[in-house]
Amino acid sequence: MNNINQKLIEIRLSAYDSRLLNNGVKFFISTCKKFTPVNLAFFPVKTSKFTVIRGPHIDKRSREQFQIIKYSAFFQISEKVLENNIQPIVKNLPAGVHFRIKVLL
């Protein structure tokens, strides 16, 4: 399938909501699958938790806990797909989905 001279592009999508990430992945894959096969993988969920003291002067035992959950996915496609099609794909991604593009040799 892949030629020796053909470069691969790795695209990472991340979001703080799993539904947004799934919509972004479906949109990106449906656009890119017309041209080339796509290898898709989801990363494990990253959870960061932290605790804040509510009132530091009166009651130091009163605390609140928060957590941030980040969902990520990545896939690889050939470089030919993104040469002309990157602008419409990026503009139509759902709001809240972040992406990073990396060229693999």
Image: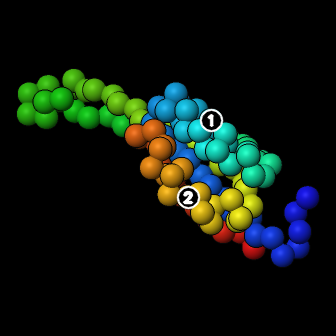
Can residue 41 be seen here? The reply is: yes
Q: CA distance from mark 1 to mark 2?
A: 16 Å
Instruction: Classify mark 2: helix, strand or loop.
Output: helix
What residue did someone put label 1 on?
26
Q: Does residue 70 appear left or right of residue 36 in this picture?
A: left
Residue visible at 33% across and 28% down in the picture: 65
**Residue extending furthest left?**
57
Q: Earlier in the sequence, mark 1 or mark 2?
A: 1
Around disc 1, counting alpha carbons within 10 Å, would you say few (fewer than 14), some (14 to 19), or many (20 or more)? few
Q: Quadrant of residue 24?
A: top right
- Which x, y percent locates residue 92? 47, 44
As displayed, is residue 53 above or below residue 74? Answer: above
Q: Amino acid at mark 2?
A: Ile
Along the viewing direction, whichever of 94 and 55 lies nearer the viewer: 94
Along the viewing direction, whichever of 36 and 68 lies nearer the viewer: 36
Q: Are marks 1 and 2 in contact (CB under 8 Å)?
A: no
- Which x, y percent locates residue 21? 54, 36
Q: Does residue 41 appear left or right of residue 5 in this picture?
A: left
Along the viewing direction, whichever of 80 and 55 lies nearer the viewer: 80
Q: Quadrant of the C terminus?
A: bottom right
- Which x, y percent locates residue 69? 47, 35
Instruction: Classify mark 1: helix, strand or loop.
Output: helix
What residue did someone put label 2 on?
86
Residue visible at 58% across and 32% down in the picture: 22
Q: Quadrant of the N terminus?
A: bottom right
Q: Does residue 60 appear left or right of residue 7 in this picture?
A: left
Along the viewing direction, whichever of 1 and 84 lies nearer the viewer: 84
Q: Amino acid at mark 1?
A: Lys
